[in-house]
Image: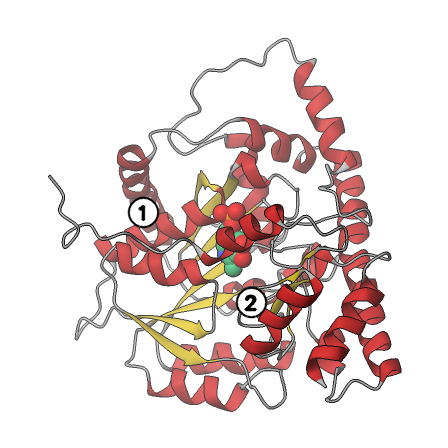
Amino acid sequence: SFPPEVVPQAPEDPLFGLMRAYKADPSPNKVDLGIGAYRDDNAKPWVLPVVKKADEILRNDPEANHEYLPIAGLAALLGKAAELLLGPSSPAIAEKRVASVQTISGTGAVHLGALFLARFYQIQGVNRTVYLSDPTWANHHQIFTNVGLPIATYPYFSKETKGLDFEGMKAALASAPDGSIILLHACAHNPTGVDPTPEQWREIASLMKAKHHFPFFDTAYQGFASGDLDRDAGAIRLFADEGFELVIAQSFAKNFGLYGERAGCFHYIASPSLSSAELTARVSSQLAILQRSEISNPPIYGARIASIVLNDPTLFAEWQDNLRTMSGRIRDMRTKLRAKLEELGTPGRWNHITDQIGMFSFTGLTEAQVLKLRSDYHIYMTKNGRISMAGLNSKNVDYVASAVDKVVR
Ligand code: PLP
């Protein structure tokens, strides 16, 4: 059997604990700023209109059935998913340097990539440490540790400016051993909402090239951050254009609102060389073996929905419109929250609320202030002061601002 010294009681995932506490709170004023899922102005989940249309098409398709997908997933999705990241005129796609596998959303993609690197990433001197931003999506730590890859961190967030600690980040990348694996959030960094500027990305790329570092992009918010799919893929395209060999974990959870359907892809991109198509085929064959032992075949429903939209120009245009609706509402909430705090004269500077981008904002609130917001005002956020912007709406933003004002004073 499994005695407690061997299998101790594990702590509850903090985010899910927070969700439970929120649900149990009977206050009519309660506000959920914890959950990383989009909510509309009525604090309700939003099924994207374009997803409803794709669902209708799927339900009326006489050919649709519940057979297994191939091990690599839905072919009609894979190519379009790569194109979405790399652009329609990508040389990597034209030169068959991309190996793509459908995964269990972004989490599964990060996991498959981690597993692949744990098995195959070798470099002289055998440095295989994965460098994660400090802070990062908490699951990164667990996923890479689970496959036995050592992890380290690079500075990312400046507590002073509540922006990027660019000097700290560069210094860490420069002093990491050559060939280190560097995990990068493609856009809308979770949990800080802080992204490098295009110029800073160029510096990061040239530094990483000089150090032969291996980029591992995690992209969970393409189109959701700026409302522009191409712009949110800018960092990935820069690295691909620079000829990096790299991997990408891609989630369709947020940008399609397909959270529970677990739609996503993992992509390997070889750097340009005479043998890159052959190398890509080898990588692809090994990814299939790993996939087989992990999940056999990826789930079909969300993949079909995403694929219907990505393959139909009219639906694609409508999707872009839906993305602008979500990102626009979030930007609007950022503006309103900042304006209200400034109007109240809340101590401190609040420009970071609008400087940051995407689902989350690192407010700079202390743990004590976070707990006071929860106990006295029924406002729920993670202890690190991260708020999900999607939890704000026109009805609660003033209430949240005045509560923050009170706990900060
Ligand atoms: N990576 C980051 C940075 C995330 O924020 C998330 C979701 O919160 C994911 C990956 C994966 O999400 P999912 O597995 O739901 O696609």
Camera-nearest label, 1 or 2: 2
Q: CA distance from mark 1 to mark 2?
A: 32 Å
Rendered image: mark on residue 191 = 2
Whole-percent x and y of residue 118?
Answer: 24, 57
Mark 2: amino acid? Pro
Q: Mark 1: which secondary structure?
A: helix
User: Given the current orientation, which residue lies at the most extreme left position?
Assistant: 1
Instruction: Relative to 363, say whether 137 is above or below.
Output: above
Residue 163: x, y in percent? 62, 82
> Does residue 93 appear in the picture of this structure?
no
Residue visible at 14% across and 55% down in the picture: 5
Which residue is the extreme one toward the right? Answer: 343
Q: Residues within 10 Å of mark 1 (few under 14, many from 20)?
A: many
Q: Earlier in the sequence, mark 1 or mark 2?
A: 2
Q: What type is the residue that disc 1 sits on?
A: Val
Location of mark 1 (residue): 283
Residue in view at x 66 percent, y 48 percent: 255
Q: Identify whether 20 is placed above or below 175.
A: above
| Quarter holding residue 406 | bottom right
At 40% across and 53% down in the image, what residue appears? 12
Relative to 165, residue 283 above or below: above
Q: Is residue 48 left or right of 156 when viewed as pictured? A: right
Instruction: Tell me the residue at 66%/59% (across/down).
Output: 33
Q: Are marks 1 and 2 in contact (CB under 8 Å)?
A: no
